[in-house]
Amino acid sequence: MTAEAEAGTEAPAKKGIPKLFIIIGAGVVVLLLAAGGLFFFVSSSGGEADAHGGGEHGESAAAEAHDTFIFNLPPMMVNLNSEGQDNPSFMKLTIALEVADEHVMTEIQPRLTKVIDAFQVYMRELRKSDLEGSAGIYRLKEELLRRVNLAIYPAHVESVLFKEILVQ
């Protein structure tokens, strides 16, 4: 009976050893993930402190951000391309243009009709599905920026800002 008793005690001990390795392995993986996350957090926060904090680069970036001007465009309502659909779709859009200085604002004013025309021609060809999700809105923003810069060349708009977007 002693041989059976010894065999009985050894069997659970052998099963316990692989569980021990799994637990230790999982602990090591958790520690490595925590160390990687800490490294990522520390390295990314160091870059933010550099951009926002003191130093010449941080001060010049802050100065550039405050020296921009906003040029508001009138609200636009556009019928979207609803080819093959029973219900017509439309989009109401209110846009502001971010410019570097007041001189660019004075250059945009006489060309405003040209800018709105460029926007209208492009937006009338959009489908409702083109505007779905953040990627669709981002593409719209980039295309409007490209078109406004073509319409007012040699002046330059920094970015297009959406104040209101309504798609129905």
Image (cartoon, rainbow, N blue to C red):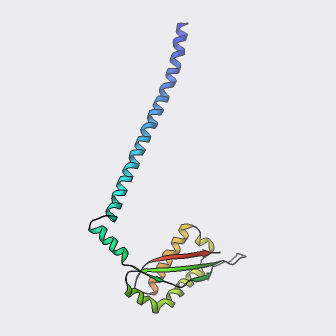
Q: Nearer the viewer, residue 14 or 163?
A: 163
Pinpoint residue 139: horizontal percent, then vertical percent.
52, 72
| Residue 90 seen in render | yes
Specify the farthest residue to the top.
1
Instruction: Tell me: residue 144, above or below residue 31.
Output: below
Could you tell whether 113 is left or right of 41 in the image?
Answer: right
Quadrant for residue 80, please give it. Answer: bottom right
Q: Nearer the viewer, residue 130 or 47?
A: 47
Quadrant for the N terminus, please. top right
Instruction: Tell me: residue 1, above or below residue 125.
Output: above
Pinpoint residue 132: horizontal percent, then vertical percent.
59, 69
Pinpoint residue 135: horizontal percent, then vertical percent.
53, 68
Quadrant for residue 165, please give it. Answer: bottom right
Q: Residue at x 55, y 70 (%)?
A: 136
Pinpoint residue 55: horizontal percent, then vertical percent.
27, 66
| Residue 154 seen in render | no
Quadrant for residue 109, please give it. Answer: bottom left
Q: Residue at x 37, y 83 (%)?
A: 101
Specify the farthest residue to the bottom.
110
Could you tell whether 101 is left or right of 81 in the image?
Answer: left
